[in-house]
Amino acid sequence: MLDDEGETSVFVNRDLVEPDTIIDEERIVGRDDQLESVVSFLKPTLQGNRPPNMLLYGPAGTGKSLIIGAVTQQIIELCQSKGKRFGVVDINCQPINTLDQAVFELVQTVAKDVDTKIGVPETGVSTKHKYRRLYKLINEHYDSVIFILDEIDLLVGRRANDEPAYSKLLYQLSRASNTNEIEGQVSVAALTNDPKFMEDIDGRAESSFNPRDVYFPDYDANQLRQILENRRDAFRPDALTDDVLPLVSAFAAQSHGDARKAIDLFRGAGDLADERGDEKVREDHVRESQEEIDKDRSLKLVEGLTTQKKISLYATASVAHFSNWSGSSVPSPVGFKVYQWITEEIDADQMTRETYVKYVKELSTYGLISSSRKSRGRGGGMYMEFTFTGDPAAMMNRIVDDTRMEAVSDQEELLRTVINSQLKKFHNQ
């Protein structure tokens, strides 16, 4: 079976349809203004000057990581040709819970890049000690550096009433060269789907970070089509039927212009053709791949969740499904109250609100939910707001297959009453 693998593959360069592959400039579509801005902001690095900090914002799948990755890769190569050492320290903040973990992740990323020991334990030493190790590594191995903090708004930290962890991190990194902790030039690029996170940044951090903004709008259908055309050579020249590209583009356009989803679907259709031993990718491969994406991402993953995560998801989905309020977003305080009610009904262990929010936020990793921080105004505090990317009712039905949840599903009207009572209290506060 291993010897036969790839003999009839529709692919010749599958990496081109991996969404995080750094591609050549010629393949970048519909982002001329953004590319020009990022190039102009980072160009001072080549002259030994400090570039400005940047805030790259816009919906998911609109090219933020793609552009910053392509430009920094070019700068690495140009600096190497001039005998300069340019470092790119790129982390995704989504799975990181605390400031201390974020700093350790930065140390780990630099150590891996320069092929040296991390030199500091993950636990047991202060965050300040980790900062010192980070700065020492950078000073020893780079002449200039850019920190790329993807999904920066998700690095909130554990204490809801404290300054967000991302605010503290932006403050420290953006001032590191001014305080001579880093000897070379430092730039920070923050990437986010929600630019409103800047509203919660401490005044000192905002003044120190002071970024140049680069906005990334959704791709339109024509741009999505061109993106796919520019990666067509991932496949054999005769491997795609004429209706594949238009259909993939149309499905992606329905997903709010997300190029990552378009590329995922393009690759998925090819994988399906390979699995079946077909020599061409056809319309039926695309349609079936789209069905699998819709079904698998939102439902199959549910089956593997722990009981507590299922309860958390069911509570949140039920608020979205039964809400009488306009919109289907779920405020975390309401979701948690419903979670408490459900755990009492089925006599399950009850986690803290912090744990409930953590579990629901983890589901964004699977593409089930998107989350954003919201403010209740002066003195009202912060909370998380959850929005479902799929059908919440379908998720609820799948979770009910866990027999412990049947007791709740049989009380639909009572559950609806509890939810709308909690929503009313929340909105009237």
Image (cartoon, rainbow, N blue to C red):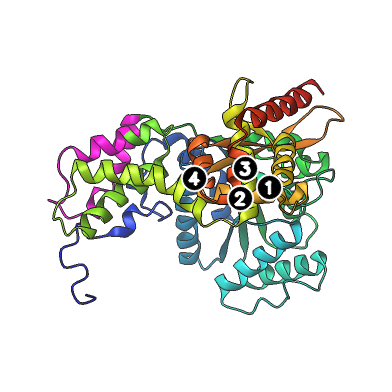
* Left or right, residue 244 beside residue 60: left
Amino acid residing under circle 1:
Ile
Counting residues from the N terminus, which is met first, the one under dot 4 or under dot 1? 1
Counting residues from the N terminus, which is met first, the one under dot 4 or under dot 2? 4
**Real-space Cα separation, disc 1 to disc 2, in angstroms:** 7 Å
Residue at horizontal 29 percent and vertical 59 percent from the top: 14
Viewer-nearest of labels 3 and 4?
A: 3
- Mark 4 nearby-residue class (10 Å; few <14, some 14–19, many ≥20): some
Badge 3 is on which residue?
407
Which stretch did the figure color magenta?
221-250
Badge 4 is on which residue?
398
Q: Secondary structure at mark 1?
A: loop
Residue 137, image quadrant: bottom right
Q: Secondary structure at mark 4?
A: helix
* Left or right, residue 241 beside residue 272: left
Is 25 placed above or below 422 here? below
Badge 2 is on which residue?
404
Residue at horizontal 21 percent and vertical 40 percent from the top: 244
- Mark 1 nearby-residue class (10 Å; few <14, some 14–19, many ≥20): some
Evaluate if marks 3 and 2 touch, with contact meaning CB atoms under 8 Å apart: yes
**Real-space Cα separation, disc 4 to disc 2, in angstroms:** 13 Å
Amino acid residing under circle 2:
Arg
Q: Which numbered circle lies on residue 346?
A: 1
Counting residues from the N terminus, which is met first, the one under dot 1 or under dot 2? 1
